[in-house]
């Protein structure tokens, strides 16, 4: 509070200093009479304040060299009061978002994460998606993006007697083993049975039947 003394008799206007994030009371008129003490009470009220929330906090994908990762999404919303104005950005050239800005009064906004990964070499990649809402609590927020790019798998072949043993790495789980006896036909068929896991490899054993057979891994 504040105490003011020495005012002359008459009408006076009391003005109140603004306080950040609080509403400033209106000016008050105080009438002073001779030898009078006057008390005037006002209330500062906190202005509505937005609060930034995002979900999920992490995105991850595993792909093969030459493959474009599928789009993913996350949500942005206002968990506080008023209107939340925000922007979204990334720090990787192979990653983009849409939209790059928005506003929420409480509804959850969906942000689409687009990948451009066809030119990436094999390895592990990481990036950050930053969501910034000036004037809001919990701002900024960061979504961590982790991407693993595996080498294109190859098939290992071992011939034992009348058995052909095919093997390929288990990290190529998005690939399907296929075969064809006539390459010009283009009629490849999936092999989904009699596939076992041995260590870090898938293994399929095929009996030699006198026919020329071609195998491939198809994603």
Image: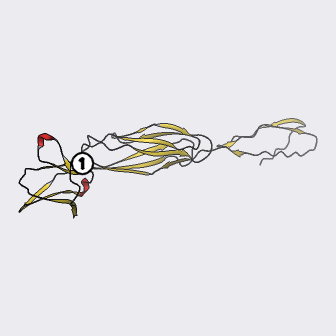
Please give the residue where the numbered disc 1 appears in the rendered image. 122
Q: Nearer the viewer, residue 134 or 202?
A: 202
Residue 13 vs 52, above or below: the answer is: above
User: Residue 77, how many percent across, how many down?
Assistant: 54, 45
Q: Nearer the viewer, residue 139 or 200?
A: 200
Say what secondary structure mark 1 lies in.
Answer: loop
Q: Nearer the viewer, residue 99 or 177?
A: 177
Q: Nearer the viewer, residue 165 or 79?
A: 165
Whether residue 19 appears in this view of the structure is no
Left or right: where 109 falls relative to 83? left
Name the quadrant containing residue 73.
top left
Left or right: where 140 falls relative to 8? left
User: Residue 96, how many percent across, how many down?
Assistant: 38, 39
The residue sitting at 17% across, 43% down in the picture is 187
Callout 1: few (<14), some (14-19), or many (20+) C-alpha neighbours within 10 Å? some
User: Residue 215, how many percent across, how many down?
Assistant: 14, 50
């Amino acid at each position: 509070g504040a105490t003011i003394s020495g005012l002359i008799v008459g009408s006076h206007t009391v003005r109140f200093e603004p306080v950040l994030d609080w509403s400033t009371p209106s000016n008050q008129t105080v009438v002073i009479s001779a030898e009078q003490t006057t008390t005037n009470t006002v209330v500062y009220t906190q202005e509505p304040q937005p609060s930034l929330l995002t979900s999920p906090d992490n995105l991850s994908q595993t792909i093969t060299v030459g493959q474009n990762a599928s789009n993913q999404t996350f949500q942005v919303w206002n968990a506080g009061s008023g209107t939340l104005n925000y922007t979204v950005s990334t720090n990787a050239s192979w990653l983009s978002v849409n939209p790059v800005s928005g506003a929420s009064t409480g509804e959850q906004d969906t942000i689409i994460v687009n990948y451009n990964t066809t030119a990436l070499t094999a390895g592990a990649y990481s990036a950050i998606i930053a969501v910034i809402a000036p004037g809001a609590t919990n701002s900024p927020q960061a979504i961590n993006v982790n991407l693993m790019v595996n080498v294109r798998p190859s098939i290992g072949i071992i011939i034992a007697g009348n058995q052909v043993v095919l093997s390929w790495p288990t990290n190529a789980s998005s690939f399907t083993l296929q075969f064809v006896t006539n390459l010009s036909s283009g009629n490849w068929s999936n092999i989904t049975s009699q596939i076992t896991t041995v260590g870090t490899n898938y293994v399929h054993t095929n009996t030699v039947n006198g026919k020329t057979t071609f195998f491939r891994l198809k994603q």
